[in-house]
Image: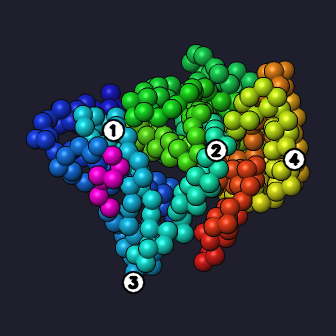
Amino acid sequence: MSETVENTITLQKYLDLDQRGKLIAEYIWIDGSGSIRSKGRTLNKKPSSVDDLPEWNFDGSSTMQAPGHDSDVYLRPVSYYPDPFRRGDNIIVLAECWNNDGTPNKFNHRHECEKLMLAHKEKTIWFGLEQEYTLFDQYDNVYGWPKGGFPAPQGPYYCGVGSGKVYARDVIEAHYRACLYAGINISGINAEVMPSQWEFQVGPCEGIEMGDQLWVARYLLHRVAEEFGVKISFHPKPLKGDWNGAGCHTNVSTAEMRAPGGMKYIDEAIEKLAKRHKEHILLYGADNEQRLTGRHETASMSSFSAGVANRGASIRIPRSVAKEGYGYFEDRRPASNIDPYLVTGIIAETIAGPIPDADMSKEFQRETEDE
């Protein structure tokens, strides 16, 4: 039995202790590198709404979000979820980051995204995100791969079953249950094309809820993997060579697209996306050029394309949608390490129209202006 598993068994004795009417709220947020941070605090009573949750703060100079001479960054709760690790009345709190002058922190892309989603609420924009990721061991080797070597070429691993075809299914199953317990709208999982690469899908979710739920699902994945001694990578090309990269394919529909005759609106949306291809690519993840090469089920980053059932296109229209004449489309360009607020925000802005006080393209400029 591994030390990690032994420690988890020991910890369970303490997780079952009576908390004397108190509950623990684990606040989570996105830092300056696009990673997740968290810290816990004790609350005296169970909240009935997000408004009952206190604002908090942290040292932004330690998370690349503020200078050392003015380091306080404030955490404003936006949603909360049952905690599958502590259980009981304990919760996970997703928070936005705000500066002490009352402005959103430059890495807080949720604020602008929410403006767009609220402005286009009548469109009822649904998203579904397919989050791919890769497993590594504690020594930064791809989990389960031969030491100093490589497994057999890609082929038997996608949706594989059996030893030698799938790795760390225990981690994936634990994460699946944790998401369900927390109320995440996780719609499925599968092993991916590269061995030790997996995918989970979240959605459909409407508007800002898509970004919220994906970030919480990512947090849960990191926490589950932590207990198994496994590392999670969201890099879009974790291994160079003849191996598939990792994406976060983004499925999109409006109320008009989902109704009979909706193909007309899907086609119109694709035309709008084509005109802003370069602007979207800027927000579709770091190092995405390593993945979008035109190989390994991707389109080339340098050009825009669309097609029915074509996994080598920028935008794929599912065969069933083309047959029925309504439904949704899949944007295959986003990388696995995207900020979902940037991606869902610019898609909403492009297909539904800009609004006066929000510009997702400027979000990228705001984040990188001091680099």
Left-right relation of 243 to 37 = right
Q: Residue 260: where, in percent of width, then height?
A: 78, 25
- Please say if the residues under marks 4 and 3 sit with CB atoms less than 8 Å apart: no
Q: Nearer the viewer, residue 163 or 289?
A: 289
**Amino acid, disc 1:** Asp
For the residues labelled 4 and 1, the Cα–Cα distance comes to: 42 Å
Residue found at x 65% / y 30%: 192
Q: On residue 69, which mark appears?
A: 3
Q: Residues within 10 Å of mark 3 (few under 14, many from 20)?
A: few
**Amino acid, disc 2:** Glu
* Nearer the camera: disc 2 or disc 3: 2
Q: Nearer the viewer, residue 30 or 205?
A: 205
The first of marks 2 and 3 along the sequence is 3
Q: Residue 275: where, in percent of width, then height?
A: 86, 55
Q: Residue 327: where, in percent of width, then height?
A: 74, 29
State yes or no: residue 53 in magenta: yes
Farthest front residue in view = 122
Q: Nearer the viewer, residue 48 or 284?
A: 48
**Amino acid, disc 3:** His
- Please say if the residues under marks 1 and 2 sit with CB atoms less than 8 Å apart: no
* Nearer the camera: disc 1 or disc 2: 2
**Amino acid, disc 4:** Glu
Provide the residue designation for mark 4: 271
For the residues labelled 1 and 2, the Cα–Cα distance comes to: 32 Å
Q: Element under label 2?
A: helix
The first of marks 4 and 1 along the sequence is 1
The first of marks 1 and 3 along the sequence is 3
Provide the residue designation for mark 2: 122
Question: Dividing the image into 4 quarters, which one contains the N terminus?
Answer: top left
Q: On residue 83, which mark appears?
A: 1
